[in-house]
Amino acid sequence: MIHAGVCTVFAKILKEGPMKVQAVVAWAVSELVANYPKCQDLFAQHNIIRLLVSHLAFETVQEHSKYAITSIKAATIHALVMASNNNPNTKNMSQVHDEDDKQFYGQIPHPLGNKSPSQMHNLVTTTMAMRSQSKPLQPEENSSTQISSHPTSSNHDNVKQNLQVHQPQHQQNVSLPGASLKGRETEDPATKAYMKAMSARALWHLSKENSAICRSITESRALLCFAVLLEKGPDDVKYNSAMALMEITAVAEKDAELRRSAFKPNSPACKAVVDQMLMLIEREDPDLLIPCVKAIGNLARTFRATETRIIAPLVQLLDEREAEVCKEASIALTKFACSDNYLHIDHSKAIISAGGAKHLIQLVYFGEQIVQISALALLCYIALHVPDSKELAEAEVLTVLEWASKQSNMTQDETLDLLLQEAKGRLELYPRNAKGLL
């Protein structure tokens, strides 16, 4: 199918086909990529990423210039953005993104018609509105080129004509989703929801272990779309969005450049995504809990020491939850407390303050085997970095580590065994910890 040109056909359908067909094509993309990951880059070369993001953004966030194809052959998001700039040789990439953000976030209508904007929506709108004040207003005569996300059929031709008049010749744009918006607004809600669900599913599989595609996704408005859909979308849309975020953050965990560019702490889209995932973790949604926990763990290096709100919800999951949940919560917290994290001491103290030590001791002693190993690793890192903690001494953590060092199933892993011995040695240097052993 790939060699026969299915990528080209799918791209054409996602651009011009009926929405019901487009939704099935998005599903087919997800299936092909899931079963044959080598075709990820081929789909990306055919603009499938931007087409899918455009479908995701339709009626989710305001349409934006990043979802338009310029007449210049732009093979990458970078080239697309640079092509839409009047002076591409005089502005760097960060300036281009700043201008795009000012334009895009200036006035964002609340998605799905909610008339009482959520806290997340207010955060995004307020932040970007402040930034947009420094941007000069567009000439009044160009106001006719502003197309609302729901153009009526009566003024569609006039808008189209005005675009042709006011657009520079080298920047004439064609709307990317379905070539035109005609007919999309009239689709029934079930078809629109299915289209978003399948678009998110395709992006989930396309982003898996692929830095280039993850960069294309995060340079678009997909993160903001995912945040909105996690808040307001149907169940299958929420699930596929959460899985896509899990895969993107997994790549960002290993790719420092992607992590710094896409998940900056002061980024409104990143804040919105984190807020929604934390809310779902606190609610303990059975379908979304584990992907959200994994995603937060993947972003452990991006959080500041002051972001203590991240730790407590994860620690609560260590208290008498299902084995799989306890395991993933332990792994996520380990990414905060491990030595590779620059703020490991601050995060370790936050875990102790949230009551993590007593929960971990229970899991090491009485948890299932899959939980015991991850809980022991986290307990070792905390003991290693905060050995003088009064809470650890009162909980007799050194006694727990002594017991664990005699269990064959816990010392089979050489790395864990070395960590265990190192943590024991650190605790033994402090008399009040040693007393617990006597």
Image (spheres, rainbow, N blue to C red):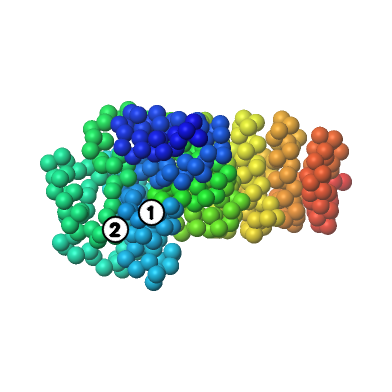
User: Residue 177 versus residue 250: which sits nearer the camera?
Assistant: 177
User: Residue 325 versus residue 112: which sits nearer the camera?
Assistant: 112
User: Residue 242 versus residue 174: which sits nearer the camera?
Assistant: 174
Q: Secondary structure at mark 2?
A: helix
Residue bearing mark 1: 73
Counting from the top left corner in percent of width and height, residue 196 is at 38, 35
Q: Secondary structure at mark 1?
A: loop
User: Residue 41 versus residue 253: which sits nearer the camera?
Assistant: 41
Name the N-terminal-most of marks 1 and 2: 1
Q: Residues within 10 Å of mark 2 (few under 14, many from 20)?
A: some
Considering every residue shown, the one lying at the far front of the view is 4
Counting from the top left corner in percent of width and height, residue 331 is at 65, 42
Q: Residues within 10 Å of mark 1 (few under 14, many from 20)?
A: few
Q: Which mark is residue 265?
A: none
Q: Is residue 312 left or right of residue 96?
A: right
Considering every residue shown, the one lying at the far bottom of the view is 90
Viewer can see residue 299:
no
Residue at left offset 40%, top offset 54%: 74
- Disc 2 marks a residue whose amino acid type is Gln
Q: Label 1 to label 2, Cα distance in Å?
A: 11 Å
Viewer can see residue 106:
yes
**How many numbered dots are placed on residues in this image?**
2
Q: Is residue 73 left or right of residue 378?
A: left
Q: Residue 51 occupies which quadrant of the picture?
A: top left
Residue bearing mark 2: 171
Which of label 1 and label 2 is nearer to you? Answer: 1
Residue at left offset 65%, top offset 56%: 341
Residue at left offset 56%, top offset 31%: 35
Counting from the top left corner in percent of width and height, residue 225 is at 39, 44
Residue at left offset 68%, top offset 55%: 340
Can you say whether 42 is above or below 123 in the image? above
